[in-house]
Image (cartoon, grey):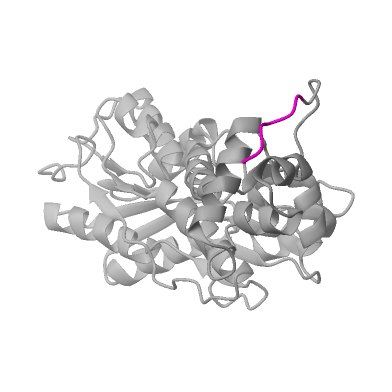
Amino acid sequence: MQTPEPLGGARPTSRDVARTAGVSQATVSLVLGDKWRGRVSERTAEVVREAARSLGYRPNLAARNLRLGHTRTALLVVPALTNEFFARVYTGAATVAARHGFGVVLYPSPDGVGPAKDPFASARAALDGVIASSMASDALKAFRGTDLPLVMLDSDPADTGAAAHVNLDIADGMRQVTGHLLALGHRRFVHLASAVPSWTFDVRAAALAETLAGVSVRTVRAPLDVHGAMAATERALATPGPRPTALVCDDDILAAGACKALRRLGLRVPEDVSVTGFDDLALATAVEPELTTVSLPAERIGERGMAALLAVLSGEPPQPDDLPVTLVPRGSSGPPPAS
């Protein structure tokens, strides 16, 4: 190997590496692109790697990506940046992306119903693909009709506009919740349902109706915030007739609002009314009593979503299985009052 020449502070290039190693630039490209096997000897490959290390050479990724026609960047579209669930989805996606030299840009679309606008002058030029978490199909029109692959998380598997789907077993989660409450003896329910039109909430409602067929159930819709949940809970309890003994909430935020409303009405949780949530956010253990809820593997779905996008980009079939969810019984659920 030749002795490295001073570069005068300039960033070393592949030509510098080739000169230092005594090989061609093509050989440097093969070795540093990890495409040398069968074309370059192991000894030559090590000489090139050592030359790159000694010079402090780093490849110009922007130029490389421009040559190859891709940016190694994915866009993750979510309904909100303030929800812990989507932060965890991003963490999972970004972890897998980093292992493959990709970056993930996080982008919110209002309430998941859109429309999600193209955040770039041209998404096609700036991105390799899009991952959308818990988004309505119509909210993603800006990314349809292009050659960008779209991976949908927690969304309608019948949507043929997506290159891949990664879903949670949401229906089973609701069956676990209602089965838990039925086993405790509850027979009068209120479903505190999200007012946001979304496949994931439709699935919860359908599973609840199926499991509680023949049992008293009343549905009250609420916006996805604590104050909206409080107002909806008060409306539900003001309805004439026997008081419900269990409130099944579409997520933990609604459940927190329900618990707050019950306390203001002088009712105890769970002695007078049991309350359950969905998602298992940090909020679930911050309230008192702690929420019985369904734990969703948010980071895992982010990981699987990014893996599915990488598979699509490589022309491979993504893994299709739904991810399991788990009921976490805590203090907010108990037997109904004796009366």
Query: What span is in magenta?
Result: 1-6
Residue pushed farthest top? Answer: 9
57 relative to 220, above or below: above
10 relative to 190, above or below: above
Q: Position of residue 262 (x, y in %)?
A: 34, 31
12 relative to 167, above or below: above
Q: Is residue 116 visible?
A: no
Of residues 7 and 123, the one nearer the viewer is 7
Q: Residue at x 55, y 53 (%)?
A: 45
Magenta span contains residue 282: no
Q: Position of residue 38 (x, y in %)?
A: 54, 71
Magenta span contains residue 5: yes
Drawn side of residue 83 relative to residue 191, left or right? right
Drawn side of residue 148 relative to residue 179, left or right? right
Of residues 47 and 237, the one nearer the viewer is 47
Q: Quarter of the image containing the N terminus?
A: top right
Residue pushed farthest left? Answer: 338
Drawn side of residue 306 relative to residue 182, left or right? right
Q: Residue at x 55, y 68 (%)?
A: 311
The quarter holding residue 323 reads bottom left
Of residues 6 and 177, the one nearer the viewer is 6
The quarter holding residue 104 reads top right
35 relative to 236, above or below: below
Classified by dominant secondary structure, the portion drawn in magenta counts as: loop
Q: Is residue 298 visible?
A: yes
Q: Quarter of the image containing the C terminus?
A: top left
Q: Residue at x 39, y 67 (%)?
A: 322
Drawn side of residue 61 relative to residue 302, left or right? right
Q: Residue at x 43, y 48 (%)?
A: 298
Q: Position of residue 271 (x, y in %)?
A: 17, 35
